[in-house]
Image (cartoon, rainbow, N blue to C red):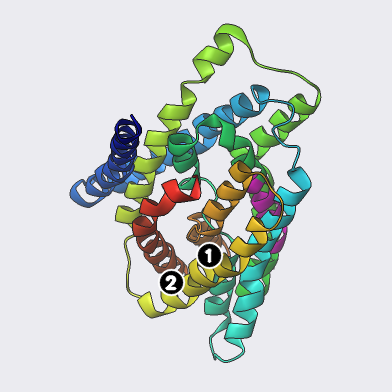
Amino acid sequence: MKWVFTSQAIVDTAIQFGLFYGFILIGYLLARLSSKGKEANHYLNLLLINILIPILFIYTLLTASPNAITELPTIVAIALIIHLLGPALMYLHLKRRNYDNSTKGVFYICVTFNNALFIPLPLVLMFVGTAGLPIVIIFSLTQMILLATLGSFMGAIFGGENGGYSKITKDALTFPPFFAAIIAVVLFLANIRLTGDLAYVLSFTGPVTTYLALIAVGLGIGVRFSLVEIRAALEVVGIRQVLIPIIVIPVIIFSGLAQLPASILILESLMPPAVLTVIYAKSFNLNSEKAASIVTVGTLLLLPVIFFIPFIFG
């Protein structure tokens, strides 16, 4: 019986991996083989960011157990460590380098802000289910607050575009998933819950968001595919996806967190730089091509690591 169970688990995991890589491949092929790849990427991101992810955030928190975020202070503290270690390590790295401000700005932004949604979200939904989403939401909320403050400060300092500071801050604070999460947290604290038919209908946003987000990842790789600045990209990725996890994972393990939030935070620490960093680079007149290369290289290097995700989730 044990062998049958193990075989079934292997088959289920293989199917999940097939779906994960398959949908990313579909997105990538659409971007590379179709003249509408960039347009499809634009509209799919609009659908995800403005409708599906906000609805999923609200549904998740309003159907969650009141005990779902009992470890909130520890989760937020570790999320801050995951983000702030990046610029600290990059500062030490850049002391031995002579780069222009545009490159420094891109390095700082890319090493600080990892992909908190578009890759972790489908992975958590596929391997854990909606029970893990409150931790993803808390991590994303922490990141958006840092983007609006620290991220805008970095862009303004290194890009010299002080006029863009207020606009970028406003855009970050009105980012639909962030706004929806704030509303959901308020309703959750007010003990308002989703039940009945409405909860059932909204539950379908989980699988729909999962597969569309994976297609969006593939489209993003195809549209922004750039290895022009691969050496510079590896400088950032080495810190973001190697050094930070090496430092943070022992902290998470010995933090006393339960297995589920701990495993999701480990997953978040492994993520490559966020696509939003390219948008920030453009907004502050930083080297956006270099930012695109960093995001591309980081995402491609993450893909083989996905095979070890089941071990992270136990």
Q: Nearer the viewer, residue 6 or 229?
A: 6
Task: Please indicate whether residue 37 sits to the left or right of residue 54 in the image.
Answer: left
Tag 1: amino acid? Ala
Q: Nearer the viewer, residue 255 or 171?
A: 255
Mark 2, secondary structure of its residue: helix
Residue 99 location (% of width, % of height) = 53, 86
Task: Please indicate whether residue 73 sits to the left or right of residue 46 in the image.
Answer: right
Mark 1, secondary structure of its residue: helix
Residue count near mark 2 (Cα–Cα under 10 Å), binned few <14, some 14–19, many ≥20? many
Task: Write down the quadrant of residue 54 in the picture.
Answer: top right
What's the residue at 30%, 35% (across, down)?
Answer: 3
Region rendered in magenta: 139-150
Task: Write down the quadrant of residue 105 in the picture.
Answer: bottom right
Residue 126 in view, yes or no = yes
Image position of 236 with respect to 113: above or below = below
Q: Are marks 2 and 1 in contact (CB under 8 Å)?
A: yes
Q: Residue furthest front?
A: 1
- Label the magenta part by its dominant secondary structure: helix
Residue marked by disc 1? 281
Residue 176 location (% of width, % of height) = 60, 37
Q: Nearer the viewer, residue 98 or 19?
A: 19
Magenta stretch containing residue 146, yes or no? yes
- Give whichever of discs 2 and 1 has the lower sequence position: 1
What's the residue at 50%, 59% (across, down)?
Answer: 270
Task: Write down the quadrant of residue 293 in the picture.
Answer: bottom left
Residue 161 in view, yes or no = no
Tag 2: amino acid? Lys
What's the residue at 29%, 40% (across, down)?
Answer: 14
- Quadrant occupied by the N terminus: top left
Task: Please indicate whether residue 217 sits to the left or right of residue 102 in the image.
Answer: left
Residue marked by disc 2? 290
Magenta stretch containing residue 88, yes or no? no
